[in-house]
Image (cartoon, rainbow, N blue to C red):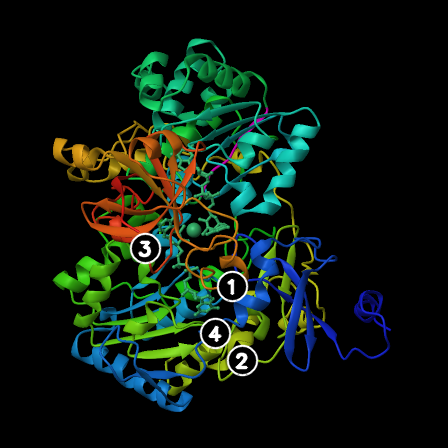
Amino acid sequence: MTELEKKIKAKIPGEDTGIEIKRSLCAVCSPGNHCGLDCYVKDGKLLKVEGTLEHPYNKGKICTKGASNRDYIYRKDRVRTPLKRVGARGEGKFEPISWDEAYQIIAEKLNAVKEQYSPHSVAFFSGFCKWYRPILHRFCYTFGSVNFGTDDSTCFKSTDICHHLTTGRGGNGPNLPNANTFLGWNYGGYYSNHLAVPGAQALKERGGKIIIIDTRYTPAAKNLADIFLQINPGTDGALALGMAKIIIDNGWADMDYIEKYTYGFEQYKELVQKYPLDKVCQITGLNPDDVFAATKLFATNGPAAINFSASALAHRTNGLQTNRAILCLSALTGNYDQPGGNIPSVASYLHKRGGFDTREMEFRESKRPHDQLRIGETRFPPWDEYCDEFQAMDLLRQIEEGTPYPVKAIVGFGFNAKMFPETDKLVKAFDKLDFFVDADMFMSYTTRFADIVLPSCSSLERGEMKAYEGGYLTFTKPAIPPLYESKSDVNMLCELARVMDLDDDLLKAGYEACCDWMIQDTGLTVADLKASDLPVKVPGAKPTVPGEYIKNGFKTRTGKFEFYSTAIASYDPKYGLNPLPDYVDPLADENDPETKANYPFHLIAGARIPNTLHSRLHEVPWLRSLRPDPLVEIHVDDAKRLGIGEGDKVALSSPHGTIHLKAKLTSKVKPGVLMMAHGYTEANANELVGRNHLDPYSGYPGFKSLRCAIRKEAE
Ligand SMILES: Nc1nc2c(c(=O)[nH]1)N[C@H]1C(S)=C(S)[C@@H](COP(=O)(O)OP(=O)(O)OC[C@H]3O[C@@H](n4cnc5c(=O)[nH]c(N)nc54)[C@H](O)[C@@H]3O)O[C@H]1N2
Ligand SMILES: Nc1nc2c(c(=O)[nH]1)N[C@H]1C(S)=C(S)[C@@H](COP(=O)(O)OP(=O)(O)OC[C@H]3O[C@@H](n4cnc5c(=O)[nH]c(N)nc54)[C@H](O)[C@@H]3O)O[C@H]1N2
Ligand SMILES: [Mo]
């Protein structure tokens, strides 16, 4: 009897249950987490899932969302067959067609746009899903378009670019096992990444100290914080600069490290003089003693590691510079790339570091065209330099205006218009397209505007390759067959490459051949990976070692950690970008007296809550039952003043639109601040966001700092 069979027997007594356990992974919030799942399957139907105990990543744990995989994949609105639109865009009238017909239509339409305009007039866009991206990215380039875009336009990349600008290397992680202090800045672990929490808990248990800086009183503030700073939204840059001044003035800066490894310290030192404690506290709404105590703890109880978020601070018009100001604290105290500090690392595959190299980059780079500007290119210079995708926050403008060249077709994979500012205008602009195809698991708000909808299967119905920290690779096998006529996204793309006869033998050979090509240097093949139902250790994989990166010089223009960014200094002055990480008001573009008076609240649209993930889980019955209505959190005093009671219907308005939801009274947000989750169709936060409320460095929207009004509505 196999171990898995024993597990069933132990749980479900009786000889022949007919139940099998098949191993797969949860892709609900991939790649942040892609937890191993034991899938209980009978007659090809999924009965339930559990975390895989033997999986090196999640070691048996799964979250609320992962535990709901059955409810997720059996959502009633799964797309069942390829569909062709027969009504008006958005009307939702479609007729089923065969896969062959769907491929023929797509091939014809894309080739027609290519001929009439250019291949660049076809934009390829992926929503949150990451797993198929290497294939879609290469498909886009082989087709001849420069325009590959993803949710990177609003997620993670801004933080990554901040790190590249400042240190020459992207994404770094806090080295908690060696830290004495954790500066949990915009730390949402309990809700957004539960597997990160035990590391912080362990630090606390062995006597380490934790500072939490958040706009809201969160589980981290309650469970972990020695000092909690409840900051005014989006003012973190001012706090970071004020902390730097305290550190320098008190002689807590690590001058040896600064001397040896950094560039621009004198200019930075001059900048922070503009941020004395009283001014900082006026901007941030914090108590001077708390700020001083937190700064002292961080600077003198090292090593100290800092949390960086892919979204919270980055979703502000001052986001990239705020993160730069915070990152500077790491070098100022000699913690960057030192044990217990923040350690840079290189991803092995799909954002995950594994300590081994794959050819993911070369796989697409070798096909990249260079004969046109990407959508949004020349608007946000750091984005242009450090990201090879188009900046999707310019897509609406370019579709509408047709400059510098028209966008006439979109190939979407999980394209979700609700994640874009001015969603209503974007879906209207689709009328200007000749063709829009979207592949999704569900009949989403956006697929209703597509000409062709393709049914994607879930992670439990497909095989996919993933990397894990600790030096692992895996290639899963389907736990159940694809539901209805759905297919795995990568199979669609490789089949379409054949139908279109693209000049790309590797794509035409299929996903597994492509994966084999990408992992050719690891000593493993897809066949090796498929022989195991658990992740396989890559021979020779190396852990990230603190100090290894800076030893040979930073990969910036100066070879140093740049307080003063020479890259930013090199951009045309017409952009008005600042090489120093100075603070600007996140609402600077909405500060005219009339807007301020009419929209007195500060809305944070989209802090994470445990039972939702963007738009994809709102329709999952188990999860929806935990929070049946879209809610806006409002401070009890504000609610009282406005006559708003718990659960009352309210209207939220900005200069761009009005949405309707219910009030949740709380004292976890400050007076004057409102908080809601994003991704709802019936209360879409992004209808309140203007298309030009963007960070000039990254192009990221200020989702989390919006001027807003709230009023009670009649029942
Ligand atoms: N107001 C506000 N807006 C935000 C944010 C915020 O905090 N506030 N966060 C931003 C961030 S950080 C992100 S990452 C984005 C994410 O935003 P989105 O990319 O919109 O994320 P989802 O809604 O999860 O997924 C998009 C679509 O992918 C589909 N999908 C799921 N699985 C598959 C699959 O296997 N194949 C295919 N083809 N489709 C699939 C889903 O059904 C869904 O329709 O939102 C951004 N927008
Ligand atoms: N359950 C769930 N988990 C998710 C997701 C999801 O949709 N749902 N999305 C995934 C994705 S794509 C992403 S990008 C990550 C994001 O993951 P996180 O970065 O953890 O996301 P947030 O919850 O937006 O922000 C973290 C914390 O920052 C706080 N914050 C907001 N504004 C400010 C501010 O101005 N200053 C300070 N100091 N703190 C502030 C919020 O209150 C929150 O507690 O989550 C991932 N995990
Ligand atoms: Mo994200």
Residues rendered magenta in the picture? 303-309
- 308 is within the stretch colored magenta: yes
Q: Alpha-carbon distance for marks 2 and 4?
A: 12 Å
Q: How crowded is mark 2: few (under 14 residues within 10 Å), some or many (20 or more)?
A: many
The residue beneath circle 4 is 76
Earlier residue among tags 2 and 3: 2
Between marks 2 and 1 in the image, the one whose residue lies nearer the viewer: 1
Q: Alpha-carbon distance for marks 3 and 4?
A: 22 Å
Disc 4, SS: loop
Q: Alpha-carbon distance for marks 4 and 1?
A: 10 Å
Residue in the picture at 30% in, 30% down: 641
Q: Which mark is on residue 684?
A: 3
Q: Check disc 4 and give the amino acid type.
A: Lys
Is the residue 205 above or below the residue 623 in the image? above
Q: Check disc 2 and give the amino acid type.
A: Leu
Is any atom of residue 167 visible in this view?
yes
Q: Which mark is on residue 621?
A: 1
Measuring from the top left, give residue 456's x and y in whole percent.
Answer: 46, 75
Residue in the picture at 49% in, 62% down: 360
Disc 1, SS: helix
Earlier residue among tags 2 and 4: 4
